[in-house]
Amino acid sequence: MKIIGIDPDIDKPGVCVLDEGGNILSLESVPIASLIYDLCLSHAVGERENKIIAIEDISKKKATFFKKGVANHAANTRVSNSIGMVQGSHRVIRDVAIRCGYTVIDVPSGVGKQVKNNPALFKKLTGYNGRTNEDVRDAWAIAKWALHKYEAKK
């Protein structure tokens, strides 16, 4: 069984693949088109069994809100547009995964906040020595959260 954690983004979602023991098999940011293609390809060749897709559910965030510290209307509009694009990517990735027959788990937004912003903590928790960015660290936290939920159901 593999858990595929996805931090949605319109350009390059963060993707982490964990094995059943929680070990990192893959950790990368990939173009959204490549991610969708790979999900469809795995479905077409019958490799979706024993794979769970865990995706951060950003849908509950308001697309238009006033972020503390944003200086002006133009900056606030950029933040709102960014959230809207992430919400759209979440919906597309989730819908493709469901249509391809994957088990999909919506993970609450913010579960990876601590490791997302702290590379040293991520390295300490995982032992992973490769390069990372906020998106892949968040994808790891999403996958780890889903793995714990999966184990709790056993």
Image: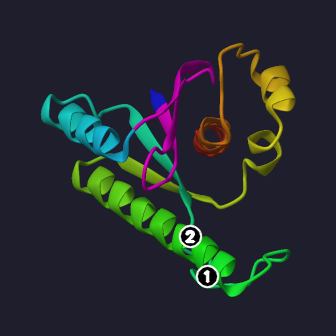
Quarter holding the N terminus is top left
Is residue 19 toward the left or the right of residue 115 in the image?
left
How many numbered marks appear?
A: 2
Write the residue at 63% across / 81% down: 74
Q: Which residues are magenta?
A: 3-30
> Does the stretch in magenta take in 106?
no
**Residue 116 location, quadrant:** top right
Q: Quadrant of residue 75?
A: bottom right
Residue 19, relative to residue 73: is it above or below?
above
**In the image, what residue occupies the spot 80% across and 79% down?**
71
- Please state the horizontal and vertical placement of residue 150, each as a whole percent of the image: 58, 42
Whether 28 is drawn above or below 6: the answer is: above
Asked if the residue under mark 2 is in contact with the one under mark 1, i.e. CB atoms within 8 Å, the reply is yes
Residue 83 in percent (x, y) is at: 56, 70
Q: Residues within 10 Å of mark 1 (few under 14, many from 20)?
A: few
Residue 32 location (% of width, % of height): 36, 46
Residue tagged by mark 1? 62
Left or right: 136 as drawn, with respect to 122:
left
Q: Amino acid at mark 1?
A: Lys
Which of discs 1 and 2 lies nearer the camera? The answer is 2
List the residue tagged with mark 2: 83
Could you say whether the residue bearing mark 1 is in a helix, strand or loop?
A: loop
Q: Position of residue 151 (x, y in %)?
A: 62, 37
Mark 2 residue type = Ile
Disc 2 residue crowd, few under 14, some 14–19, many 20+, Cα 10 Å:
many
x 49%, y 53%: residue: 9
Answer whether residue 20 is magenta in the image: yes
